[in-house]
Image (spheres, rainbow, N blue to C red):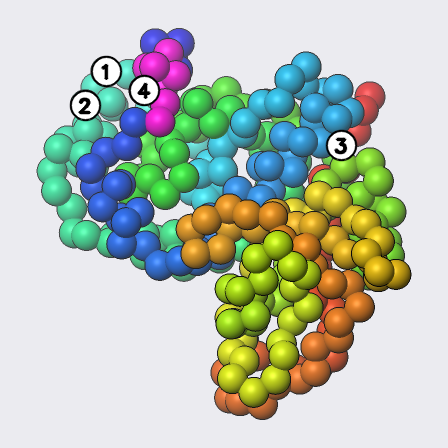
Amino acid sequence: MESLLQTFEETAGICHPDCVKASNEQEDYDASQSAALIAVSLISSARVIFKLDSEYTEYSAQYLVDNVGKEEVEGEMDQQSCQYTVENLLRYLVENVWIKKEDGQGEMDQQRREFTVKDCFEFAFKKGLPRSVHWAHVGCTFKAPPFACQIPRVPMKGEVIEATDLGEALKLGIQQPVGARLHVFSPEFDSVGEGIYDGPSGNGTSYVGLRDVIMVEAERIKGETVVTVQICYKKKTSFVKVSTRSMILPLNGDDESQVREPTCLLVDFCIPRFSIN
């Protein structure tokens, strides 16, 4: 296992051509990947803030994509096929890498399991997390080998804390970054630039959907509380100032993803609260 971990570390950041192709063809938004990326970023930040890690440590988002919501197999680590042996390694390479499989098979398996940032926190507290250098990169199209269950995971002890409203979220944010979701409307969000995003402006507005964000800062601008969030939108990570005063009114339409009741732009606040002792 030590030799496998060393190989992972030496090849970190190197992608198989199939993974590069899949990434280039991927649509702008993958809900599960987004939730996993936000979750591990918040976990890494919290652990260094509360001195559980001596330095910022990146944990594997792809581990969460591969495992959150997956049915558990009792006694998996003791099964012969889950042991790290040369025989099992060669079998995995033959069945999953060297022989071309039908395109999209792995992606379809993952699409059937959508989950939230909260789900990721709960899974991490239950199972722990491997470091990112010890697992596949985000978006890897190859199924994790059965013996991946033997890869060491860092124990995570704590609980998920949810805020019922923005006021509570801002209090949580005094100590650590807060996860949330943002109602995104186009073209308003696309053109916000360095201004303040305040939601839909009127005719011609279309609802894009909810996007995972990290609340990183709150400030008063012209008497209004404005929250700066980190978001990945159209495959680009940026920081955007969001109004906390705007209320979104329900939109008409048959699409179930449309806003159905008055709400603020930022919703669904949560953080990982670690046990220090």
Q: Nearer the viewer, mark 3 or mark 2?
A: 3
In this picture, which residue range is highlighted in magenta?
Answer: 6-13
Horizontal and vertical percent for residue 175? 82, 36
Q: How far is the residue under mark 1 from the one under mark 4? A: 19 Å
Q: Which mark is residue 274?
A: 3
Q: Nearer the viewer, mark 1 or mark 4?
A: 4
Horizontal and vertical percent for residue 46? 71, 31
Q: Nearer the viewer, mark 3 or mark 4?
A: 4
Q: Nearer the viewer, mark 3 or mark 1?
A: 3
Q: How far is the residue under mark 3 from the one under mark 1? A: 38 Å
Q: Amino acid at mark 2?
A: Leu
Whichever of callouts 3 and 2 sits on the residue coming sooner in the sequence is: 2
Horizontal and vertical percent for residue 212? 59, 54
Whether residue 70 appears in this view of the structure is no
Q: Is residue 125 left or right of residue 20?
A: right
User: 140 or 100: which is nearer to us?
Assistant: 140
Pointers 4 and 2 in contact (C-beta within 8 Å): no
Horizontal and vertical percent for residue 12? 36, 23
The residue singled out by tag 2 in the image is 90
Q: Secondary structure at mark 3?
A: strand
Q: Is residue 125 left or right of residue 143?
A: right
Dominant secondary structure of the residues highlighted in magenta in the image: helix
- Figure quadrant of the C terminus: top right
Q: What residue do we see at 26% from left, 41% from top?
A: 20
Residue most toward the left?
A: 99
The residue singled out by tag 1 in the image is 86
The residue singled out by tag 4 in the image is 11
Q: Amino acid at mark 1?
A: Val
Whichever of callouts 1 and 4 sits on the residue coming sooner in the sequence is: 4
